[in-house]
C-alpha cells in the first residue's frame, strides 16, 4: 500500500470516528435525553381508540338508564347514574389509551416544575395528534 492510500484511509477513518464521537456526544448532552419520542401514528390511533371506547361506554350508560326508567327509577337517580357511568367510562378509556402514551413523554407523578421545555413541546404535539385521532 502506498503512502497516498494510507493517508486517504487514515483521513477517512478519522472523519468517520469524529462523526461517530460527535453524534454520541450530541446524544449525551441533548436536552431531550431520556425523553422518548412517541410515534405520531400511535398517538392518532390512541385518539381513535379513545373515541370508540368512549362512545361504547356512553351508549352503555344510556341503555342502562333506559332500563332503569323502565323499572320506574326516579329520573333524578337515573341522571346521577348516567353521570357516574360516563365518568367511569372516561377514566377507563383514558387509562387504556392516553396514559400509556403520555407516560412515555412525562412519567406519571412528575411535578410540573420538573417538566422540561422539550417535554412540554412533545406533550403539546401529542395533544394535537390525539385531537386529530379524535376528530377522524
Image (cartoon, rainbow, N blue to C red):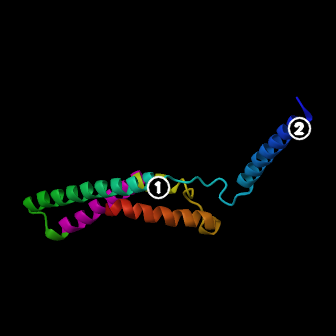
Q: Is residue 3 visible?
A: yes
Horizontal and vertical percent position of residue 132: 38, 62
Depicted 121 relative to depicted 102: above or below: below
Magenta stretch, main secondary structure, is: helix
Residue located beneath label 1 in the image: 40
Residue most extreme to the top: 1
Query: Label 2's element?
Result: helix
Which badge, 1 or 2, is on the more N-terminal residue? 2
Q: Which residue is drawn at 64% across and 65% down?
A: 114
Residue located beneath label 2 in the image: 4
* Residue 115 located within the stretch drawn in magenta: no
Q: Residue at x 30, y 54 (%)?
A: 53
* Residue 93 located within the stretch drawn in magenta: yes
For the C terminus, give its image quadrant. bottom left
Q: Distance between the residues labelled 1 and 2?
A: 49 Å
Q: Dot 2 surroundings within 10 Å: few (below 14), some, or many (20 or more)?
A: few
Q: Which residue range is magenta in the image?
A: 77-96
**Which quadrant of the figure has residue 73?**
bottom left
Q: Dot 1 surroundings within 10 Å: few (below 14), some, or many (20 or more)?
A: some
Amino acid at each position: 500500500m502506498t503512502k497516498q492510500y494510507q493517508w486517504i484511509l487514515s483521513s477517512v477513518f478519522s472523519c468517520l470516528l469524529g462523526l461517530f464521537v460527535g453524534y454520541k456526544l450530541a446524544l449525551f448532552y441533548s436536552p431531550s435525553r431520556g425523553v422518548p419520542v412517541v410515534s405520531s401514528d400511535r398517538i392518532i390511533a390512541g385518539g381513535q381508540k379513545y373515541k370508540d371506547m368512549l362512545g361504547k361506554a356512553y351508549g352503555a350508560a344510556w341503555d342502562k338508564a333506559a332500563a332503569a326508567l323502565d323499572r320506574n327509577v326516579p329520573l333524578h337517580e337515573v341522571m346521577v347514574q348516567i353521570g357516574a357511568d360516563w365518568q367511569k367510562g372516561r377514566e377507563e378509556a383514558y387509562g387504556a389509551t392516553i396514559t400509556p402514551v403520555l407516560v412515555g413523554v412525562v412519567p406519571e407523578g412528575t411535578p410540573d416544575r420538573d417538566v422540561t421545555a422539550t417535554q412540554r413541546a412533545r406533550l403539546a404535539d401529542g395533544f394535537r395528534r390525539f385531537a386529530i385521532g379524535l376528530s377522524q
